[in-house]
Amino acid sequence: MSISTPNAISTPSTSPTITTDALIIGFGKGGKTLAAKLSAAGRKVVVAEASADMYGGTCINIGCLPSKSLILSAEQARRDGANSTPETREAAFEAAIKEKRRVTSMLRDKNYHKLADQDNITVITGRAHFTGPHSVEIATAEGPVAVTASKIFINTGATPRIPDIPGIHTTPGVYTSTGLMDLDDMPQRLVIIGSGFIGLEFASMFADFGTAVTVLQHNAEFLPREDADVAAAIRAQLEAQGVKFLFNADTKAIAPATDGGVRLSVAVKGMTRGASQACDSTPAGTGNAHTDITGATDTTTTTSPTSNPTDHATMSHVQTKPSDDGEPRFVEPAEARFCLTTDAVLVATGRTPNVEGLHLEAAGVELTERGAVKVDELLRTTAADIWALGDVNGGPQHTYISLDDYRVVWSQLNGSDRPYTVKDRKHVPSSTFLATPYSRVGLNEREAKAAGLDYVVKRLPVAAVPKAQVMRRPDGLMKAIVERNTGRILGAMLLSVESHEVINIVKLAMDLDAPASTLRDMVFTHPTIAEALNDLFA
């Protein structure tokens, strides 16, 4: 049942108020799974979703599935050579966007009908906000609908975090990942602000399509939470694709360029040589974001540069100050200024829990210092009979964690003697879909050392895996951390083709407390990437 659908919007004629057993705010993975389960148990459920474009949640509409569709299309374009000319690049990109839209539209429709077609479920399209501990008002296109529910579940996900940069909200051509995945025309040049894993996935994808990609990293270290050897291998892979990096780069302003592109004023700490010209005095439209920094890409990992930027880069004026004898002396500035011009900018600086406009205070729901809904190990908020599932509660931002959050909540509603809790959750794996996927679970070497553990490091080059050679994908490395005396698997990092599948085998072994020898001696089919675990854990 639907109160408001994309094609027909209506407000209930019987009453402006709905009383229900459960209200779920947000159509994400955890919420929609819980709605179906409650309905099957005979409960009346209302699901409120702010946008008809988001039925099914972030993952299927603007997150993991559309991005993976585009990544696979980009890889195909690279393999086929379709990224070699402007004409073939545009055609490949157009086809990829068309396929992405087909997939998301199909999944969105299926997700919508999976709930709305059930007699016990009412889907209301509109933005919800609390008016009391168990009451919510939903603003639909036809007017407000009031809902009173015995139990309420917040499942509103996360939204891109936008840094406070002048011009970032008003300049055409500046996108979050949502907008960049829905362009009709492929940008020939792309600047990505942020080198976290979301930014790197897009860097790899657009580089495969043939876009000239430049990544701006705010600090000096690439992937600082990863082991240095793994981070270096990931960076080398991206640079082999043509991605360029500028570290210690602070974007000061964004503005339209005269050629219709985007101009960024970028300050780079630790670089002290180059032309002396303020960015504001550079004619808009000059420079190329992909080539301006060619000579500077490796200079900012240390405090002193190793090469000069090209002529297109502009840098801050050389400063002067008096010496001890009163005479002026020249002092090189602490940073250089660049004017970078590009066709598009991706802001990939993280995501923040989506709580804006919910009026949580009306229900007594508190937030953490980081702006997430505060929950306990059962995902209960600070208000009775209100829970928070998925990204909005500040946990790991993965669809499969939202699904596991559903398990935590359902275990309390189904009469279990001992509910499943967040503390029972083990070894959350993750995958980043680069040209060579990177997957990891558990501790890396950096973390094991910081924890004072006695461990051994296991390493295996992917080139030593027969299946990787057969697939013509020998790039990457496999690394595992094993406790020395017990053989306990502490963690694994797989930069390898099909790592996103293999990592789940390692997670299962860790969940079962199986020693490394279990994977060392396991019988795998051949040839597979999974059988590399025999050698990795030998």
Image: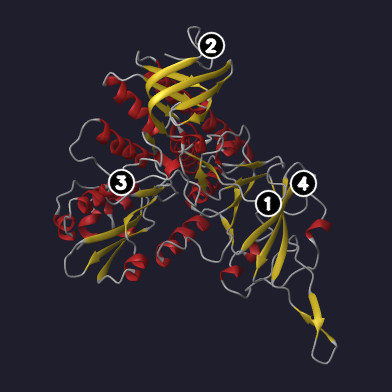
Amino acid bearing label 2? Ser
Number of the front mark, 2 or 1: 2
Q: CA distance from mark 2 to mark 1?
A: 41 Å
Residue occupied by mark 1: 165
Q: Secondary structure at mark 1?
A: loop
Residue type of the residue flagged with mark 3: Val
Q: Which residue is mark 4?
A: 257
**Residue 10 disc label:** 2
Question: Closer to us: mark 2 or mark 4?
Answer: 2
Q: Earlier in the sequence, mark 1 or mark 4?
A: 1
User: Would residue 448 appear left or right of 247 to someone viewing this image?
Assistant: left
Whichever of labels 2 and 4 marks the residue nearer the N terminus, that label is: 2
User: What crowding class fits label 4: few (fewer than 14 Cα within 10 Å), some (14-19), or many (20 or more)?
Assistant: many
Give the structural element (helix, strand or loop) at label 4.
loop
Which quarter of the picture shows residue 452?
bottom left
Of the numbered discs 3 and 4, the one sitting upstream in the chain is 4
Q: Nearer the viewer, residue 46 or 168?
A: 46
Query: Is there CB contact under 8 Å for labels 3 and 4?
Result: no
- Name the residue at 47% across, 28% down: 104
Q: Is residue 391 above or below residue 61?
A: below
State which quarter of the image contains the N terminus.
top left
- SS at mark 2? loop
515 relative position to 239: left or right? left
Query: Mark 1 or mark 2, which is nearer the start of the sequence?
Result: 2
Q: Which residue is labeled 3 in the image?
A: 422
- Residue 529 appears in view: no
Q: CA distance from mark 3 to mark 4?
A: 49 Å
The CA span between labels 2 and 4 is 45 Å
Residue plotted at (44% across, 16% down): 18
Inspect the image, locate mark 1, and give the three-letter code of the amino acid beneath it.
Answer: Ile
